[in-house]
Amino acid sequence: VRHSKEYVKALFYLGAALLYLRGAFGAATAALFALALAVKESAITLPAALLLFEVCAPKRPSWREVARRQAPVWFVAVAGLAAMLLSARYRDLLGYGFTQRGLTENLLTQLNGVHYLLARLVSLRGFNIDPGLPELAAWTPALAAWAGFLAALAGLGAANLRRRPELGFGVLWFFLQLAPTNSLVPRLDPANDRQLYLACWGPFLALAVCASRAMTPLRARAAAAVLLAAFAVASVARQIDYGSEIRLWEASVREAPGNARARNNLGLAYQEAGRREEALEQYRAALRLRPDYTKAGVNKRLLEWDMGKR
């Protein structure tokens, strides 16, 4: 369901951007933006994305004209933020997140989350429905180097907004789309593969523009075909993991054997399939990783009781 929501959000989000770029009525753009925001609150970045389009445009309009065109979109953004803050449930979720992780710990953890996401995008392997990334509380040399790389990458994007706007747009679009989920607001799961769905659109668009300028049309099409084939193969291979509950959680445990939650979920899948001894072993493995993991402990005891072991 969460993956489907990301697809629907991207549909409304990009649809709103397309209407805006084609000069459609502001009300139509705002309506699609409202739908995207209703699906996922991370769509709140659309007004900033539209500003990014304007900054990268060959003929930059006056700020007065930009303000006039974007007024309905910003109205929806302010209304959406107000609705979130007025919702008791949403305030509870935000408050709970901040009780789990301090500002410094969250920054370090989110840096590691962005590292995980970029590694998946570049390598096309290691996808995981529950990567179980650790919470980090102290700087390490590797994390500091990664933070320096991200800062340099963001600086490269900002520096090229006018000289090579396609490059600047692709880089800053990526960071903009990850800002709601991988910046200041603590999340229980620092990173999920679905966060890449909309974020990678900008870099891929920039890559296509750069390739079309650097290569002949025939070579550009050949390179695009190879890239599409590689992504298609990776996508099909990943979809096989979704063939069953057991296969999905086996893949998760295989990629992150130290994730107690994935092992507990695999145990539940085994138990529902009647493979009770294997389920019991997964519950025990989850408790070895996290002795205070209540869900795995309860599942283990209930299963042992049902099997007559206690």
Image: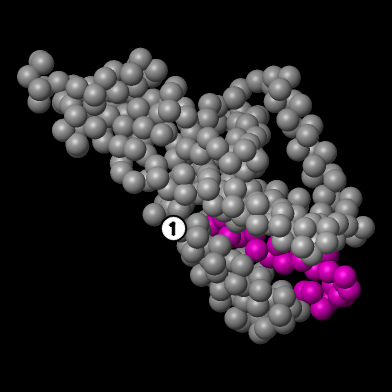
Q: Nearer the viewer, residue 65 or 300?
A: 300
* Circle 1 crowding by C-alpha within 10 Å: few under 14, some 14–19, many from 20: few
Q: Position of residue 111 (x, y in %)?
A: 66, 34
Q: Position of residue 138 (x, y in %)?
A: 65, 20
Q: Residue at x 74, y 25 (%)?
A: 144
> Is residue 71 in view?
no
Q: Which residue is mark 1?
A: 4
Q: Residue 203 placed where, x, y %? A: 71, 53
Residue with the most extreme bottom position: 25
Q: Quadrant of the N terminus?
A: bottom left
Q: Taking 143 as reference, is 130 left or right?
A: left
Q: Is residue 309 above or below residue 296?
A: above
Q: Which residues are magenta?
A: 41-67
Kindly report the secondary structure that dominates the magenta region of the rendered protein: helix
Snapshot quadrant of residue 64: bottom right
Q: Is residue 212 visible?
A: yes
The quadrant the C terminus occupies is top left
Residue depicted at x 66% and y 70%: 17
